Image: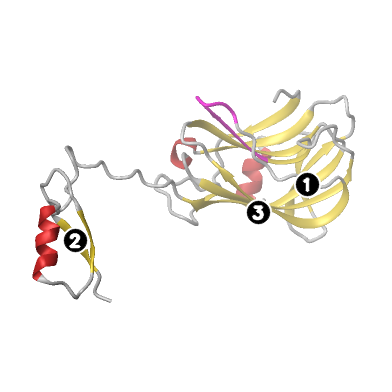
Amino acid sequence: MKVTCFVLLLTLLTACVIVSAINKGDIIVQHNFDGITEQATWNKVLGPLVQLVTTERGSTALRTDRKQLDSPSTWVQITLPASTLRGCKIRIQAAVKAENISVPPNSWNGIKIMLHTKGSSGDTYPQQNLPQGTFDWRMADYVANVPLDTDQAILALGLEAVTGAVWFDDLNVTVYSKPRPHPPTPPAGQPYKGHNLTRLRGAMIGINLQEQDFRDFASWNANHVRWQLL
Protein backbone atom coordinates (compact mmCIF):
# COMPACT_ATOMS: atom_id res chain seq x y z
CA MET A 1 0.00 0.00 0.00
CA LYS A 2 1.61 3.25 -1.14
CA VAL A 3 0.26 6.59 0.05
CA THR A 4 1.48 10.15 0.08
CA CYS A 5 1.23 11.27 3.66
CA PHE A 6 2.37 13.76 6.24
CA VAL A 7 3.69 11.59 9.06
CA LEU A 8 4.68 12.48 12.59
CA LEU A 9 6.75 9.65 14.01
CA LEU A 10 6.65 9.09 17.74
CA THR A 11 9.42 6.70 18.75
CA LEU A 12 9.52 7.26 22.49
CA LEU A 13 7.05 8.66 24.99
CA THR A 14 7.44 8.77 28.75
CA ALA A 15 3.77 7.79 29.01
CA CYS A 16 4.34 4.76 26.78
CA VAL A 17 4.98 1.54 28.69
CA ILE A 18 7.28 -0.94 26.92
CA VAL A 19 7.71 -4.38 28.46
CA SER A 20 10.29 -7.03 27.66
CA ALA A 21 8.49 -10.02 29.19
CA ILE A 22 4.83 -10.17 28.27
CA ASN A 23 1.71 -11.69 29.71
CA LYS A 24 -1.92 -11.47 28.71
CA GLY A 25 -3.30 -8.07 29.68
CA ASP A 26 0.08 -6.31 29.80
CA ILE A 27 -0.06 -2.68 28.66
CA ILE A 28 2.12 -1.91 25.64
CA VAL A 29 0.93 1.65 24.93
CA GLN A 30 -1.41 3.85 26.96
CA HIS A 31 -2.26 7.50 26.27
CA ASN A 32 -5.08 9.71 27.49
CA PHE A 33 -3.20 12.84 26.32
CA ASP A 34 -3.77 14.54 29.70
CA GLY A 35 -1.18 15.84 32.11
CA ILE A 36 1.76 18.17 31.78
CA THR A 37 4.35 15.47 31.05
CA GLU A 38 2.42 13.75 28.28
CA GLN A 39 1.32 16.99 26.66
CA ALA A 40 4.88 18.34 26.71
CA THR A 41 6.16 15.14 25.08
CA TRP A 42 3.49 15.11 22.37
CA ASN A 43 3.89 18.82 21.62
CA LYS A 44 7.51 18.15 20.60
CA VAL A 45 6.42 16.00 17.65
CA LEU A 46 3.08 17.48 16.58
CA GLY A 47 2.45 20.03 13.83
CA PRO A 48 -0.27 22.26 12.35
CA LEU A 49 -2.33 19.31 11.07
CA VAL A 50 -2.12 17.15 14.20
CA GLN A 51 -2.62 18.86 17.56
CA LEU A 52 -3.61 18.28 21.16
CA VAL A 53 -6.89 20.06 21.92
CA THR A 54 -9.30 20.35 24.83
CA THR A 55 -12.59 18.57 24.12
CA GLU A 56 -16.12 19.37 25.21
CA ARG A 57 -15.65 16.64 27.83
CA GLY A 58 -12.90 18.69 29.45
CA SER A 59 -10.18 16.19 28.56
CA THR A 60 -7.33 16.52 26.09
CA ALA A 61 -7.47 14.61 22.80
CA LEU A 62 -5.37 14.19 19.66
CA ARG A 63 -7.02 15.99 16.71
CA THR A 64 -6.16 15.46 13.04
CA ASP A 65 -7.44 17.73 10.24
CA ARG A 66 -7.37 17.31 6.48
CA LYS A 67 -9.12 19.99 4.43
CA GLN A 68 -8.17 19.22 0.82
CA LEU A 69 -8.32 15.87 -0.96
CA ASP A 70 -5.18 16.66 -2.95
CA SER A 71 -3.20 17.33 0.23
CA PRO A 72 -1.09 14.57 1.82
CA SER A 73 -2.81 12.08 4.08
CA THR A 74 -2.13 12.95 7.69
CA TRP A 75 -1.44 10.68 10.62
CA VAL A 76 0.80 10.15 13.61
CA GLN A 77 2.78 6.93 14.02
CA ILE A 78 3.72 5.23 17.29
CA THR A 79 6.49 2.62 17.18
CA LEU A 80 5.70 -0.60 19.07
CA PRO A 81 8.26 -3.14 20.42
CA ALA A 82 8.17 -5.57 17.49
CA SER A 83 10.62 -8.12 18.88
CA THR A 84 8.62 -8.38 22.11
CA LEU A 85 5.26 -8.75 20.38
CA ARG A 86 6.17 -11.34 17.73
CA GLY A 87 3.54 -14.06 17.59
CA CYS A 88 1.18 -12.22 19.96
CA LYS A 89 -2.32 -10.96 19.44
CA ILE A 90 -2.73 -7.39 20.63
CA ARG A 91 -5.90 -5.48 21.46
CA ILE A 92 -6.10 -1.91 20.17
CA GLN A 93 -8.66 0.43 21.73
CA ALA A 94 -9.31 4.16 21.34
CA ALA A 95 -12.15 6.62 21.78
CA VAL A 96 -12.91 8.32 18.44
CA LYS A 97 -15.01 11.30 17.37
CA ALA A 98 -15.34 12.62 13.80
CA GLU A 99 -16.67 15.62 11.91
CA ASN A 100 -17.50 15.83 8.19
CA ILE A 101 -15.41 12.85 7.10
CA SER A 102 -15.74 12.54 3.32
CA VAL A 103 -16.51 9.34 1.43
CA PRO A 104 -13.27 7.31 1.16
CA PRO A 105 -12.18 6.18 -2.32
CA ASN A 106 -11.48 2.65 -1.01
CA SER A 107 -12.79 0.62 1.92
CA TRP A 108 -9.40 0.73 3.65
CA ASN A 109 -9.13 4.55 3.48
CA GLY A 110 -10.65 6.98 5.95
CA ILE A 111 -10.07 7.25 9.68
CA LYS A 112 -6.99 5.24 10.56
CA ILE A 113 -6.38 3.28 13.73
CA MET A 114 -4.11 0.87 11.92
CA LEU A 115 -1.33 -1.51 12.87
CA HIS A 116 1.39 -1.79 10.22
CA THR A 117 3.83 -4.68 10.58
CA LYS A 118 6.88 -5.39 8.43
CA GLY A 119 8.70 -8.71 8.17
CA SER A 120 10.31 -11.17 5.78
CA SER A 121 6.90 -12.61 4.85
CA GLY A 122 5.60 -9.16 3.87
CA ASP A 123 3.64 -6.27 5.34
CA THR A 124 0.29 -6.49 7.14
CA TYR A 125 -2.22 -3.68 7.75
CA PRO A 126 -4.90 -4.80 10.23
CA GLN A 127 -7.33 -2.05 11.18
CA GLN A 128 -10.92 -1.38 12.20
CA ASN A 129 -12.85 0.48 9.53
CA LEU A 130 -14.81 3.44 10.89
CA PRO A 131 -17.78 5.28 9.36
CA GLN A 132 -17.70 8.49 7.36
CA GLY A 133 -19.63 11.66 8.13
CA THR A 134 -20.02 13.06 11.63
CA PHE A 135 -20.36 11.01 14.80
CA ASP A 136 -19.91 11.53 18.53
CA TRP A 137 -17.46 9.69 20.76
CA ARG A 138 -17.40 5.93 20.26
CA MET A 139 -14.92 3.18 21.05
CA ALA A 140 -12.84 1.53 18.35
CA ASP A 141 -11.80 -1.89 19.59
CA TYR A 142 -10.19 -4.75 17.66
CA VAL A 143 -7.62 -7.54 17.97
CA ALA A 144 -4.67 -7.81 15.57
CA ASN A 145 -2.09 -10.52 14.94
CA VAL A 146 1.61 -9.69 15.07
CA PRO A 147 3.37 -12.16 12.72
CA LEU A 148 6.25 -14.23 14.09
CA ASP A 149 8.73 -12.66 11.65
CA THR A 150 7.80 -9.05 12.46
CA ASP A 151 10.80 -6.69 12.40
CA GLN A 152 8.85 -3.44 12.72
CA ALA A 153 5.42 -2.62 14.17
CA ILE A 154 3.84 0.82 13.92
CA LEU A 155 0.45 2.09 15.08
CA ALA A 156 -0.98 4.85 12.86
CA LEU A 157 -3.69 7.33 13.93
CA GLY A 158 -5.13 9.90 11.53
CA LEU A 159 -6.82 10.43 8.16
CA GLU A 160 -6.04 8.80 4.83
CA ALA A 161 -7.46 9.98 1.47
CA VAL A 162 -10.43 11.77 3.09
CA THR A 163 -11.17 15.25 4.38
CA GLY A 164 -12.62 16.24 7.74
CA ALA A 165 -11.50 16.17 11.34
CA VAL A 166 -11.05 13.32 13.81
CA TRP A 167 -10.30 13.22 17.53
CA PHE A 168 -8.59 10.34 19.39
CA ASP A 169 -8.56 9.77 23.14
CA ASP A 170 -7.97 6.99 25.70
CA LEU A 171 -5.61 4.99 23.49
CA ASN A 172 -4.69 1.55 24.83
CA VAL A 173 -2.68 -1.28 23.29
CA THR A 174 -2.56 -4.43 25.40
CA VAL A 175 -1.48 -8.05 24.99
CA TYR A 176 -4.57 -10.08 24.07
CA SER A 177 -2.79 -13.45 23.93
CA LYS A 178 0.79 -14.69 24.06
CA PRO A 179 2.45 -16.78 21.34
CA ARG A 180 1.74 -20.48 21.48
CA PRO A 181 4.68 -22.40 22.95
CA HIS A 182 6.60 -24.67 20.62
CA PRO A 183 5.71 -28.37 21.06
CA PRO A 184 8.36 -30.44 22.87
CA THR A 185 10.92 -32.25 20.75
CA PRO A 186 9.96 -35.94 20.46
CA PRO A 187 12.50 -38.45 21.79
CA ALA A 188 14.89 -40.01 19.31
CA GLY A 189 14.11 -43.44 17.88
CA GLN A 190 10.84 -45.31 17.60
CA PRO A 191 8.15 -44.48 20.17
CA TYR A 192 7.49 -47.14 22.82
CA LYS A 193 4.34 -49.12 21.98
CA GLY A 194 3.97 -51.01 25.26
CA HIS A 195 5.59 -54.18 23.86
CA ASN A 196 8.54 -55.24 21.73
CA LEU A 197 6.63 -57.49 19.32
CA THR A 198 6.92 -56.80 15.63
CA ARG A 199 3.20 -57.24 15.06
CA LEU A 200 -0.03 -57.72 17.02
CA ARG A 201 -2.72 -60.17 15.90
CA GLY A 202 -5.89 -60.75 17.86
CA ALA A 203 -9.58 -60.19 18.40
CA MET A 204 -12.13 -58.94 20.89
CA ILE A 205 -13.30 -61.66 23.31
CA GLY A 206 -16.14 -62.06 25.77
CA ILE A 207 -16.24 -63.49 29.31
CA ASN A 208 -17.60 -67.00 28.64
CA LEU A 209 -14.48 -68.61 27.20
CA GLN A 210 -13.55 -72.29 27.36
CA GLU A 211 -10.14 -73.95 27.11
CA GLN A 212 -10.71 -74.82 23.46
CA ASP A 213 -11.33 -71.18 22.67
CA PHE A 214 -7.81 -70.32 23.81
CA ARG A 215 -6.36 -73.25 21.86
CA ASP A 216 -8.13 -72.03 18.72
CA PHE A 217 -6.84 -68.55 19.40
CA ALA A 218 -3.27 -69.86 19.67
CA SER A 219 -3.63 -71.77 16.40
CA TRP A 220 -4.20 -68.42 14.69
CA ASN A 221 -0.86 -67.16 16.07
CA ALA A 222 -2.77 -64.56 18.05
CA ASN A 223 -0.86 -62.59 20.67
CA HIS A 224 -3.36 -59.89 21.58
CA VAL A 225 -6.95 -59.76 22.86
CA ARG A 226 -9.41 -57.04 23.66
CA TRP A 227 -11.38 -58.25 26.66
CA GLN A 228 -14.91 -56.87 26.80
CA LEU A 229 -15.92 -56.86 30.45
CA LEU A 230 -19.44 -55.48 30.03
Q: CA distance from mark 1 to mark 3?
A: 20 Å
Q: CA distance from mark 2 to mark 3?
A: 70 Å
State the residue at coordinates (59%, 45%). Answer: 144
- Name the disc covering residue 225, or none: 2
**Mark 1 = which residue?**
130
- Which one is earlier in the sequence, the residue at label 2 or at label 3? 3
Across and down, in percent, residue 196 comes to 10, 47
The type of colouring in the image is secondary structure
Q: Which residues are magenta?
A: 114-123
Reading the image, the residue beneath label 3 is 32
Toward which corner of the image does residue 32 lie, by quadrant? bottom right
> Which amino acid type is shown beneath numbered disc 3?
Asn
Taking the image as shown, residue 18 lies to the left or right of residue 162, namely: left
Given this view, does label 2 or label 1 mark the residue nearer the observer? 2
Q: Main secondary structure of the magenta part?
A: strand
Q: Residues within 10 Å of mark 2 (few under 14, many from 20)?
A: some
